[in-house]
Image (spheres, grey):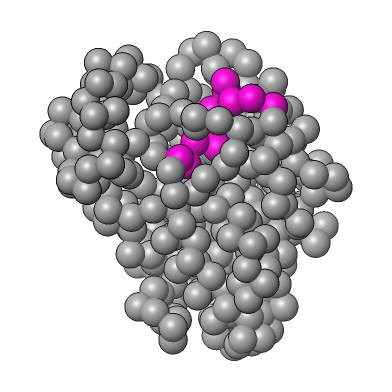
Amino acid sequence: MSAVSGVLHRASVSSVSSFEISSTVPVGDDNTRPLLLFVAGLGDTLLSVEYVIGVAAAVGEQGWRCAQALLSSNGPGWGTASVRQDAEELADLVRYFKRRGAAKVVLLGHSTGCQDAIAYLHLARDDAAMPQLDAVILQAPVSDREAPGVSEGVNRFLPQLEYQKDSPTFASPELASLLQTDIGITLHRFRSLVLPPTGDTVNLDVCEDFFSSDLSDLYLERVFAPTTCPIMFVLSGDDASYPERIKSRLPDLLQCFRRSTPEPYSSRHSCILPDADHSLSSVSSAEAFKQQVVAFLGDL
């Protein structure tokens, strides 16, 4: 990846910041232009998901700006964070850009950034002071619990997880390795990622399992119930986060998400990119995604 120019924005309320990527239109020249705000996934850092650079160029040609949110959970910080914390920090950024005149703000979530977007919708429903979003894009909304090898490993440690469910301590290295990481993870965050919901009520402080294939219809309806803006789902057909049994029924999973979204907000541009991996690393999948994003934003 070559050098990328842009502008670093820091929200006044907190230390959260964002990096606005330069495009065909000089950055910072018109604060009223609509903004696409990219929210990366677990372990990601600035521009580590490279497709966002191409997306910034594509939407820039349509008069949009694109920035990546830099949250305190970025990099190794996710192990001690939560989706509620992420959503609250995102609200600071959305408020910052809207106060500066942004005509629209659209969240583009990647991987766990999709959970953050869902958490934002829930908090915005319950807090009138929280700035509303104009649209949401969920790219690679996947289940951490259903990732290959995770549930089998977690089952071995269920007695320990139940015994320590109220413990403020960190997960053991053995538990952390189930999520293919060696960073420090609180038991609370670990449980939030790998255990299913215990009922049909969405509780952001307990469980961030929003996209598993075995969730009940009622729970999924409650996941998407706060949606009051257009939302586009983009799934990857060759995503390593899916076990083969789920890959074979991705169209059904996409339909579950769309059916659970209140009318008329589920976008007609929602799709599965057949050969795409989790981060759209191939040129063809990144290009196809750019086209979907441009078409979706064009409908707003």
What residue is at 38 percent from the left and 64 percent from the top? 71
Image location of residue 215, percent across then percent down:
59, 25
Left or right: 207 as drawn, with respect to 284: left
Asked if residue 55 shows in the view, the reply is no
Asked if residue 200 shows in the view, the reply is yes
Please identify the dominant SS of the magenta region: loop
Left or right: 263 as drawn, with respect to 111: right
Could you tell me how many numbered marks the image carries? 0
Image location of residue 44, percent across then percent down:
34, 51
**On the rendered image, what quadrant is the C terminus found in?**
bottom right
What residue is at 52 percent from the left and 11 percent from the top? 245
Image location of residue 288, percent across then percent down:
64, 41
Relative to the observer, which residue lies in front, 249 or 269?
Answer: 249
Is 214 one of the magenta-colored residues?
Answer: yes
Is 181 one of the magenta-colored residues?
Answer: no
Q: Is 130 located above or below residue 27 in the figure?
A: above
Image location of residue 162, percent across then percent down:
29, 28
What residue is at 72 percent from the left and 64 percent from the top? 134
Q: Quadrant of residue 195?
A: top left
Residue lying furthest left in this view? 173
Q: Which residues fall within the magenta stretch?
A: 207-217
Relative to the observer, which residue lies in front, 237 or 96?
Answer: 96
Q: Is 50 located above or below residue 197 in the figure?
A: below
